[in-house]
Image (cartoon, grey):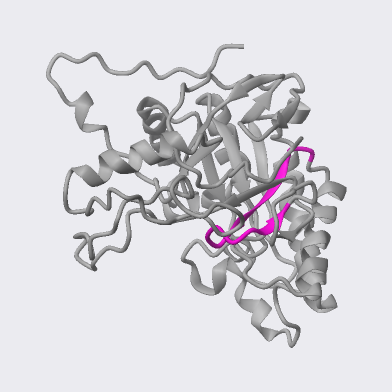
Amino acid sequence: MRRFVLAVAIMLGISAITRPACAGTPHQISWDNRSIKIDGQRVFIWSGEMHPFRLPSPGLWRDVLQKMKAMGFNTVTYYVPWGYFTPKRGIYDFSGIRDVDRALSMAEEEGLYVIVRAGPYVNAELTRGGFPTWLVTQRAKARTDAPEYLDAVDEWYAHINPILRRHQLSDGGGSIILYQIENELPETTPAHVRYMHHLYDQARADGITVPIFHNDIGRNGYWVPKSSTVANTVAGPNDLYAWDSYPGGSCNVDATPGNPNAAPDFGWYGTGGAKGGSSASPCRSARSRSGWARQKKFSELRNKPASHRVSLRSQPRRPRWTRKKNRKPAKLTAAAC
């Protein structure tokens, strides 16, 4: 049974990296409580974020994607912030540094799966969560089923979804494997439930055929699939459940670590259930000591993760273990069909 425990966005762990399936022919994307499956084969999603809108030079996008592939990632995650593409109601620009189609094609050419996060609200540490400036002229309450707001959302979807639809692995057009609606929606009133259903239904109506998920703001059990049997959760229309967490704790403005955090275990030693994650392990290794990373990785493995996404991995560096002299560079090629 498809259970909600598949955490797509930020569950942690280590597994063998599977070569991405090729575009050109339709592929079946399915899942269970262990992993994503492509054409019936299990695929551990090892994903990193790359934000083209934060790197406004299309010529550099491929460089970052190649570095991600060389580091072992098999998937890239793209935020698509609504406000970046529309300076005025009804006017949209997807050219030049805003060429979503080009960014998706590059990922496919480099042999990477793609997870798209098209909002309409994306957060992403952006002003207004990525909403366009002109949206603030509305009197309607955003992120609800207010008709005026939904009308604007449908306009956004009508422009972005046709681009994304052409790049879905499920249709053979590209390498998109997952599609996210909204992000970290913390309210669960009837108005918000109707809103989430509207986003899901509209995405499907626009031709999105890959699995759809939402990213919970922490492990709260908000917006889980209706098939979930876990108590005290809030059901949504989405196919998969995901949540985010910041196991590394906070950082100071000078990029040094903040207060030491205990290594998280995401429920293995915790209470379990809808809100059982992000609790500390008995080891309580401080982040300032080497034991923190060791205990963290141990906890990740024991939790049997289904996928892992590293947030804000916009410009990945070469791992330290690849800097030894005379080490052969990684071969950068797209997956062969």
Q: Position of residue 288 (x, y in %)?
A: 17, 53
Between residue 40 and residue 164, name the one nearer to us: 40
**Residue at figure coordinates x 21%, y 26% from the top left:** 321
Q: What count of labels does the image hold? A: 0
Q: Is residue 21 magenta?
A: no
Is 317 left or right of 149, judged from the image as shown?
left
Q: Is residue 12 left or right of residue 219?
A: left
Residue at position x 77%, y 62% in the image? 196
Q: Quadrant of the C terminus?
A: top right
Q: Which residues are magenta?
A: 209-224
Residue 168 higher or lower than 9, as above or below: above
Q: Is residue 16 above or below residue 135?
A: above
Q: Quadrant of residue 30?
A: top right
Give the residue furthest to the left. Answer: 325
Residue 202, percent from left and from top: 83, 55
- Residues 129 and 214: in front is 214
Residue 240 location (% of width, % of height): 69, 45
Image quarter of residue 170: top right
Residue found at the very far bottom of the displayed protein: 139
Using the image, determine if residue 162 lies above or below residue 200.
above
Q: Between residues 295 and 49, which one lies in front from this camera angle?
A: 295
- Tell me what residue is drawn at x 44 percent, y 52 percent: 56
Where, by quadrant of the figure, is residue 182 drawn?
bottom right
- Residue found at x 73% / y 61%: 156
- Which image quadrant: the N terminus? top right
Is residue 173 among the parts visible in the rendering?
Answer: no
Q: Is residue 270 left or right of residue 186?
A: left
Q: Position of residue 308 (x, y in %)?
A: 49, 39
**Residue 269 visible (yes or no):** yes
